[in-house]
Amino acid sequence: MGHVSSDIIAVRWYGGNTPLKPSFCFCYAPFHRRENPHRFPTRSSPSTPMANPSSWISHVEAFVDDSALPNQKLASVDAIAALVKKDLLTLETLVREMELYLTTPDHIIRSRGTILLAEVLTRIMGKSLNASTIGSLVEFFTSRLADWQALCGALIGCLALLRRKDIVGMVKGGDAKRLAKSFLKNVQVQSLAVDDRKRCFEVLQCLLDTFPENMVTLGDDLVYGICDAIDEEKDPRCLLLTFHLVETLVQLFPDPHGFVADFANDLFEILGRYFPVYFTHQRSDDLGITRDELSGALMRAFCSTPYFEPLAVPLLLEKLSSSLPLAKLDSLRYLNDCISCYGAVRMMKYAETVWSALKDTIFSFSTRDLSLPSTVESVREMEPLGAQIAKAALNCLRTALSELNYPNAKPFLSLIVEDEDIEKAFNFVSGEGCYPVPSKESQSQLYALGSILSTSSKVSSDCCDRIFQKFFTPLMDMLGVSPSSTVDAFNAKSYSFLKAVSFGAIYICVELLSACRDLTLSTEVLPQQVILLHDEWFCLFKRFATPLTYSLGSMVATPDSSILVNEDHRHEVVGYAVKGLQVLTTFPECYSPISQDAYKDTLAILVNIITDIPGDSYVWRLSLNALIQIGLFIDKFNDSQKAICYREFVVQRILLWVSLDDSSVRFAQKLESVYEIGMTGREYMLAVTQWLEQAIFAKILEACVNCNFSSAEILLSMLKCYSHQVLPWFHKANSFDEVAMPFAINVWKLMGDNNAFNVNFKDQVVLDTIMMTMKLVVSGCTEENQVLIVQKGYTILLSTRSLFSEEKLAAYTALNSEGSESAPDSVCLACKDEWLISLFSSVLIALRPRTPIPDVKLILKLLMFFSLKGHVPATQALASMINKWPESRNETEESNVCSFEEAIELIFEMDLSSLIYSCPFRKLRDLTSNEEINLLFLKNDDKPFLIHALEGLTWIGKGLLMRGHEKVKEIVMLFMKCLLSNQDEIIKARQDGSADQYSFLARSAADAFHILLCDSDECLNKRFHATIKPLYKQRFFSSIIMVLLSSIKESDSKRTRAVLFRAFGHVISNTPLAAVVMHANKVLPPLLDALSVLTSDAMDKDLIYSLLMLLSGILMDDSGKEAVMNNIHLIIGHLTRLISYPHMMIVRETAIQCLVAMSGLPHARIYPMRPQVLRAVSNALDDRKRTVRLEAVKCHQAWSSIASRSLHF
């Protein structure tokens, strides 16, 4: 590059014949200052007003200003680009006004000006530009490639132009070629910073991808330039680009006498330095790449051209013998791809070397434990490196067998079949004699042999022929299986297998069986690999298949004492025998090697193990897993003939076994087996579900009518299985209503059968479980089916004389009648009535919002009546109805029900005088003062009613709160009045020993805040279609927190303050942490006071733990640091007292953990409290719970280290 001042731009405008689309170009002239910036006329659309230069020139000046912050520079670029996009500023005007910034001899300003123009182009890549404009811009940025001080902006500009699409105007091929020439001539890539190198590689990639025809004409200059650019690159981000660049480059020159062939040595010399990839960066998210991505990119570059073969294959074979596991693994993966890409012609000369290397690797790394096939599902851990190497070697072997078959050359399979080591390993298996299980030293050899033979057999039918001819018949001889063996009436109850078992023979045999099965299954995916029924391997296999099936079956079913094998190794033999039976029964129908009778007998063997020997958990689980896999196979391949056998010999027999009253088998084990068998297919699951429903109804009668407690336990297990396993399975299969609807209707039929269902005792656990099952059933049904379910339940309810007699109807109506003198306690629920009300309430809880409810006013009164009786399900149903009630009248006209406002009035106009006969206040909303609340307490002797009324209002308030209704304020104000009532006056007036009962009422009002804000599993949740307004907890917290805090501050009664603190604790502990932390300065001091007040009562231990968890959240949140620092002495004082909290271990543990967290606060603030903390923690070192002692040790170490930190400071 010459002197900067002589290599600058001037601007000329050419209007031409298209005045609306002026073009501009850059030419080069000695620098001189242009006194008249308006000498170059602008051309713009007369309909588009141009932006005033004063409105955007400031953005240009801000970008080139040294003092501007990075975000200010970005904002300036965005503002200018926005004007260009909206046609308020043309590129011509922008370039003319920026002329001094683009041409100044000051390289810093020139560089920033170039970057600004380039960044603007980057942001308008979707805007159409004419060819002349693009050509001029390309010419400018091409010239700037020679200006190393402005190179960054030049590269950004080149990328922005090269990435443009044809539809909005793109760079022409000739311009791209000139750009490439300038780049190759002027840019020394490896001398640049990493970001600029990355841009350089992106420019080259764009040129190769978009303009391949033009780049080919550059010939060896292009190849040499790219070699020079990528040589010695070390940055991982750039390496990804360089590897892909080489991959693209070699595809441009496929000619064997072309430039890539000439430069193949140079290119591979550069690439070979990076193999194997050693990527030591610990955090991949910093760079956005991983070692696997780098290795994969390098592997694609290796395989991109066959001209690398003379260099790549020897390198890979050399690294395969490396002692570094990662080098071995990469070598195998690369070699696998290279065999496929380079082709048989080039690779056949390496066949023997490749086989020798693969054999050594497989035999060295086949250390998989053969003893125990997996019988339980576990969390999958990272696969060991040795196993990955063995798997990669087998993949490479499979590829070599498929690819390295060339006419007039020895097939690769012959190297395996004729190998001396393979022969020696197989002879070891045949020479085992009476040694059933090989030693640990030879297990890896056995596994290696099985893997090689199995992998070879899967490749093709021809390979399978060779393997079977060589090895299968000797294996059958070892196992004593002969084609002429007779199978005379195989009796599943009498087994005799006295022959010593060769585990090696069983293992190799099962591996070959699996390979054959996989080969037949591959024909379903790859029809060109047709297996003919007269293929030699198939004919040989079919001759032995049926006798082999019975031989394996006898090994599985033989009693422990009959099989001549070491007891420690019986599981290994039986495990692979079961696997062999599973494989033999899972061939495609057209390739099934065993007879129909053998298939049925195999199923019978496995079923008999499940039903007859459930005590052997290992064999039992193996057999169950085998049956599950067989069922899944039948369902996947729609094998109708086998499906009939499976239903008859497996499903029906398992169901019959489960139905038997066999005390020797755990019922949970039976349920597990029947469910897992059922989940193999929809038809089977329907049969299982039908049996399960019938069993559930039978057990309900036994448990609740006949008072059979053992039946109650079984019923709970069945309901759990139905709710948590069967229903989710059908939901996933999109058949939920098909099962759930009949179940719900049958429940109502059972409830309506007065003769059969006559409940004699109440088991609350059973009732609660049935209610939850009913909720889950109804919640998953469609609205149409829900209508039928609720209508059926309502019909059963109406037909119940004990609930809907004239007397009871009058009692329900009395809830809103003036002057009624009836009281809820005049009605005593029978057990069956309680079941009916509970189940009907469960249905109402689970309904969708738009599901109509019949005779809704009567149902509301019914629920209100039983709510006042303390019936919690009725209360929750009432709250759910209110929560999901449609807002508009139009949505309720179809069902002819009352509107939402009418329903609310029905509840809030509840006449309390008819129920609290001595109270002069008639309605809930009339209780307006604390004095009236006090009078209510003093004059009413019906404490349960008051508690029930309060609980009912709480759930109704929760429903209103969740939907965001304003009426919840009235309920909350009633709670506050209860909290602020003068309990001292009430207790003083009560001299009969019942004063403490009225403290319980205030306590219930405080606990109402917990119900309002907590998440319930029983109702008012998403699963049961509740209406939930976003952020309702946060809104409630913001509205009530100041009321509670001011009430606590103004209260002078110890009892009142205690219940207020309890309510306050419930509110803040159930509010999301982020909302509480925003008010941490206000909340933290009363939170600590609440901890102090509540510790005196053991009943508050759960609340104390919740408050401690909230405190720990504040301690760990950065937004709460200020509040913590302001109250640090108080926090530590309360935490040290909680270390000795006697009522809950987890409170002590959490308090110590909070102190550990506080040890990281500024030293000057916490050091004065160090002795206090150490004394308290020292006492915890003798705590009776080990978990607390361990946390105390950590805390003691953390606070003791403060002294050393002080000395160091």
Image: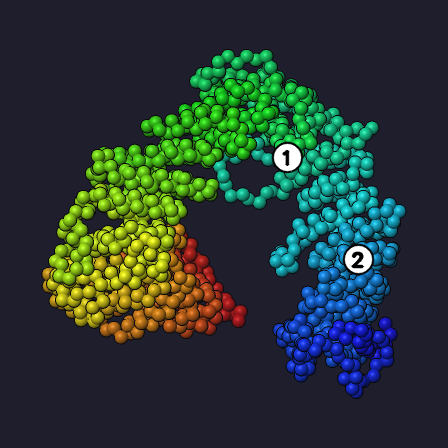
Q: CA distance from mark 2 to mark 1?
A: 39 Å
Q: Nearer the viewer, residue 328 or 287?
A: 287
Mark before the other along the chain sequence, 2 or 1: 2
Q: Residue at x 75, y 27 (%)?
A: 414
Please name whichever residue, 628 or 1159, is drawn nearer the observer in this view of the structure. Answer: 628
Tell me the residue that label 2 is attached to.
Answer: 211
Name the residue rendered at 49%, 37% in the picture.
Answer: 376
Q: Amino acid at mark 1?
A: Val
Give the quadrant of residue 931: bottom left
Give coordinates of residue 707: x percent, y percent.
23, 36
Q: Is residue 66 visible?
A: no
The residue type indicated by label 2 comes to: Phe
**Callout 2 touching callout 1 (CB < 8 Å):** no
Q: Is residue 327 above or below residue 411?
A: below
Q: Quadrant of residue 717?
A: top left
Numbered disc total: 2
- Residue 478 placed where, x, y %? 61, 18
Determine which quarter of the picture holds residue 283.
bottom right
Give x and y (percent) for residue 273.
Answer: 77, 51
Q: In the displayed structure, does residue 197 sit left or right of residue 683? A: right
Please tell me the numbered disc located at residue 525.
Answer: 1
- The N terminus appears in which quarter of the rendering? bottom right
Q: Residue at x 24, y 68 (%)?
A: 977
Residues 121 and 193: in front is 121
Q: Secondary structure at mark 2?
A: loop
Determine whether 829 is above or below 483 in the image: below
Report crowding for label 2: few under 14, some 14 to 19, many 20 or more residues within 10 A (C-alpha). Answer: some
Q: Would residue 629 appear left or right of 1173 to someone viewing this image?
A: right
Q: Which mark is residue 82?
A: none
